[in-house]
Amino acid sequence: MRKFIFLTFIFLPVFCLSTTSLFDLVEQFAGVRDFLVEFELKAEVKQQDTKRTLQSSGLLVIRNLEDFYFLVKEPAFISNLSFTYISRIKRLIFNTGSGFDFESLEIPISSIVQSIQTAMRILQTPLVSVENEGDSVVLSFSRFITQRVQEPIKVRFEVKDKQLKSIEIISPSGEEKIAIKINKLILNARVDEYFQPPR
């Protein structure tokens, strides 16, 4: 028992130092219900033996963790395509730039939010290993999980001045990855203008 307590006091400060940036970030998001995010996405994927790169950019706005607005900026052939979901009336509105269309649809927003909250709680357990690499925090899964998952991934968060700058999801081989660069992130943003009914 004494040995366990001794080891805990040795490794706890190391664990705390390596996770400070991550938990500062989680703390910023706690309780926030309105977000505005401008991002660029780059995906490197393998199809058979061919490596392909896909790129896009967009704007994501979330209101009260219930409604969302998504605008595609790139690729150019679908730029200005937007989707607005209003959970209260269960309506998804498509705007193609030249006209509107809508569909009655129930998206399980509360289940999605609960999943994200669960993921945040898992970060604070021994199931996830957290390491600092310069300005980045790298999450990888413990051996307990990796033994049960065919392809355990790694997730890298770049955090500068307590601000999230990018997210990378990396395959075990490192040959495939999804990189999301955060160009703008506003918490507690004023977002009502994005949810005005179409005219």
Image: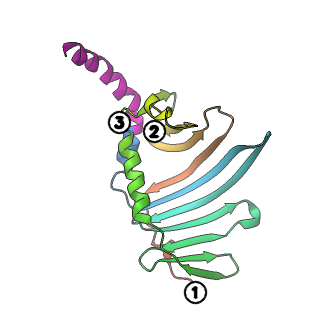
At which x and y percent is residue 26? 38, 45
At which x and y percent is residue 135? 51, 32
Question: Which residue is labeled 3 in the image?
Answer: 125
Given the image, on which type of amino acid does mark 2 rest?
Asp
Q: Which image quarter: residue 169?
A: top right
Tag in front: 3 or 2: 3
Marks 1,2: beta carbons within 8 A = no
Q: Residue furthest bottom?
A: 199
Marks 1,3: beta carbons within 8 A = no
Q: For mark 1, give the secondary structure.
A: loop
Which stretch appears magenta?
A: 1-22
Given the image, on which type of amino acid does mark 3 rest?
Thr
Upstream in sequence: badge 1 or badge 2: 2
Please identify the quadrant where the C terminus is shown. bottom right
Residue at image point 67% right, 62% down? 73
In the image, residue 6 lies in the stretch drawn in magenta: yes
Q: Is residue 190 above or below residue 48?
A: below
Question: Which residue is labeled 2 in the image?
Answer: 161
- The tag on residue 199 is 1
Classify 10 Å Cα crowding around label 2: few (below 14), some (14-19), many (20 and above). few
Cα–Cα gap, marks 3 and 2: 25 Å
> In this view of the protein, which residue sits in the foreground, 10 or 79?
10
Q: Is residue 136 above or below residue 70?
A: above
Q: For mark 2, give the secondary structure.
A: loop
Please identify the quadrant where the N terminus is shown. top left
Q: Is residue 188 above or below residue 45?
A: below
Tag in front: 1 or 2: 1
Upstream in sequence: badge 3 or badge 2: 3
